[in-house]
Image (cartoon, rainbow, N blue to C red):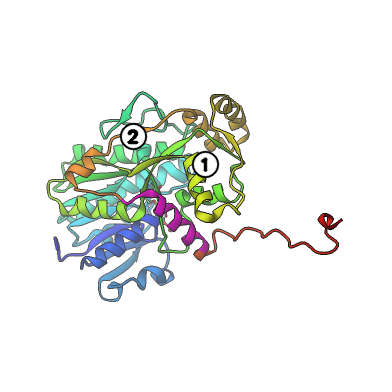
Amino acid sequence: MLTSKPVCVTGASGFIAAHIVRELLARGYRVRGTVRNNPKSYPFLLSLPGATERLELIEADLLSSGAYDRAVEGCEYVMHTASPYQLNVKNPQRDLVDPAVNGTENVLESCLKAGGVKRVIFTSSIAAITDEAESNKVFTEKDWNTMSSLERNPYHYSKTLAEREAWDFIMRKRPSFDLVTINPFMVIGPSLGPSLNTSNQMIRDIMTGVYPCTMDLNWGFVDVRDVATAHILAMEKPEASGRYLCSAESLHLKDIVAILKSSGFGNYPLPKIDLSSKAGSLLMMALSYTQPRDTGTYIRNNIGRTMRYDNTKIRRELKMTFMEIKPSILESVADMQKWGHLPLPKQPKSCSSSCCCQS
Ligand code: NDP
């Protein structure tokens, strides 16, 4: 074990952070997690194996200056994962950018004040690398998203500004700690807590008729347990440095629908019409204007293009191996059913004597 001091995990109640907490406890670490509400309201964290002896939860909000002083005090390693992950918000500056950017600055300031911090592992995102696929380009850690704004993909914008703030902080203040960022693509898998994460919600949307058709969109996917492992490897390996693009494999929307169909979920209202052709993409471009603003922008910037990225750095330097994504999708489905996020599909009514097909 690297440290006998507590490892601080901000936003411990989150989908990814809860898995980081679980894995840190499983490896024998002491953990200090920050949450937004009374710690007693997180029984799913407090009942993790090892939690009674080694997990402490304390309240902190990203927007309150000094809020993380107590959380990072006496810690050598800090995992900063807390940040709003929502699309289609009312006020992007207030709801996304301010908590992401000011929160990052607050956490880093607290680390600076605490004195003994050696490394901050920051949960960034593919969103800080790009918000659009470019079919002829392979994205790497060298790329930065320069396109997003408050009007265009504001979630991506908030993640880009927050990661930039973190690197600028290191340049400006030259603290005794270094910074390593994990930049995951779409994170899926089972949730330890009752909330439905925005990325798993996409699978639920595919299964509940929100997408009437498949279209030529694709994403990189990574299982949440692998993302947690990546954070811990980034902490444990002294040679880890810089950014790590974290994604296992890419799938098209059509592939996901095919996996669901072939795995016995054909009774859900999966998309029936296939608009993955060139003509379909043109139609979807037009239809994207009928979608909520941020979803529409995302469709227009990505439809008909293939997202290519290189995950060599994380595999080589952190020795990451990734789980296959198909089982991960199916576990996400089972998990959403377990938590009540995914209602069972309506069964066709059995025929009665008055049914029209009897006549
Ligand atoms: P969640 O929404 O599950 O977790 C977000 C966490 O941030 C929650 O603990 C939330 O607290 C906390 N948070 C939000 N706003 C505040 C605030 N004002 N003050 C304190 N805490 C706050 O999302 P994920 O677990 O998916 O995301 C974790 C991180 O990973 C984020 O930085 C996200 O951008 C990044 N990421 C996620 C990806 C994904 O596909 N899921 C992909 C790439 C990056 P509360 O529970 O109280 O709301």
Kind of residue indicated by mark 1: Asn
Q: Residue shown at 43%/49% (left/top)?
A: 84
x, y percent for residue 272: 61, 41
x, y percent for residue 174: 16, 41
Kind of residue indicated by mark 2: Ile
Looking at the magenta stretch, what is its main secondary structure?
A: helix
Q: Is disc 1 placed on a helix, strand or loop?
A: loop
Q: Residue shown at 53%/49% (left/top)?
A: 261
Q: Can residue 26 be seen in the rendering of this structure?
A: yes
Residue where numbered disc 2 is placed: 129
Q: Give the magenta part as a residue range.
A: 323-337
Instruction: Locate residue 4 relative to residue 56 in the image: left or right.
Output: left
Q: Does the residue labelled 1 lie within 8 Å of ligand 1?
A: no
Q: Toward the viewer: 131 or 86?
A: 131
Question: How many numbered marks, from 0 up?
Answer: 2
Instruction: Locate residue 52 relative to residue 255 in the image: left or right.
Output: left
Residue where numbered disc 1 is placed: 91
Q: Toward the viewer: 272 or 182?
A: 272
Image quarter of the N terminus: bottom left
